Amino acid sequence: MVGKIKKLVAFKLFIKNKRGQAAMEYLFIVGIAALIVLPLTILFFSEISDLTESMTRTQIDKASSTLAQAANEVYYLGEPSQKTIKFYMPNHIESVDMAGNNLTFVIAFDESSFSVRKYSQANLTGNLSASQGTHTVQIIARANDVLIRDKP
């Protein structure tokens, strides 16, 4: 009977040691997985940030080219011509400035700020909202300039 009890106690100790070993192996596997996943997550968010900045640049370049081309078109047609266009204004736009024949979009991200500038043959006046979304813009030729404004 004593021999059976000793064997039972020895077996229980053996099982406890195996459970401890399994727990350590589990922690080891989880640690290695974390070491692999963490850098990939950081890389993923870095690439997403770069992609967002690139898309914003492309969208603003397209919008500013469309505006400058439409301003030139109504300028060459002369007063009372006008044109209405739609374009998408992305996020991160700080301001839209019109001075002389320059149309400038100022874009600000967390780490950087840059501007996209387009030139027109006409003197540009008016104001555009820098809010995100689709904008309907009215471009009107006047005697000395071209008026660009958000359509109400």
Image: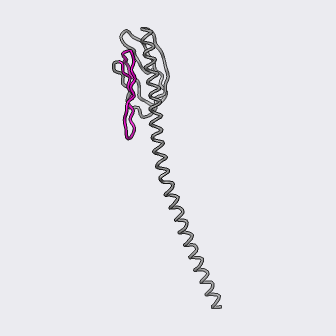
151 lies left or right of 98: right
100 or 152, nearer to the observer: 100
Residue 86's x, y, as percent?
Answer: 50, 22
What secondary structure is the magenta-colored segment mainly? strand
**Residue furthest to the bottom:** 2
Q: Which residues are magenta?
A: 101-127
Disc count in the image? Answer: 0
Q: Residue at x 41, y 26 (%)?
A: 129
Q: Residue at x 57, y 80 (%)?
A: 13
The spot of residue 90 in percent (x, y) is: 46, 32
Q: Position of residue 101 (x, y in %)?
A: 36, 18
Q: Which quadrant is the N terminus positioned in?
A: bottom right
Horizontal side of residue 38 vs 142, given as left or right: right
- Which residue lies at the image location 37% right of the left edge and 29% below the top edge? 95
Against 35, residue 127 (above or below) is above
Q: Residue furthest left?
A: 100
Q: Is residue 119 magenta?
A: yes
In this view of the protein, can residue 22 be seen by the observer? yes
Q: Residue 97 in magenta?
A: no
Q: Return the x and y of residue 14 as percentages of the image width and height.
A: 59, 79
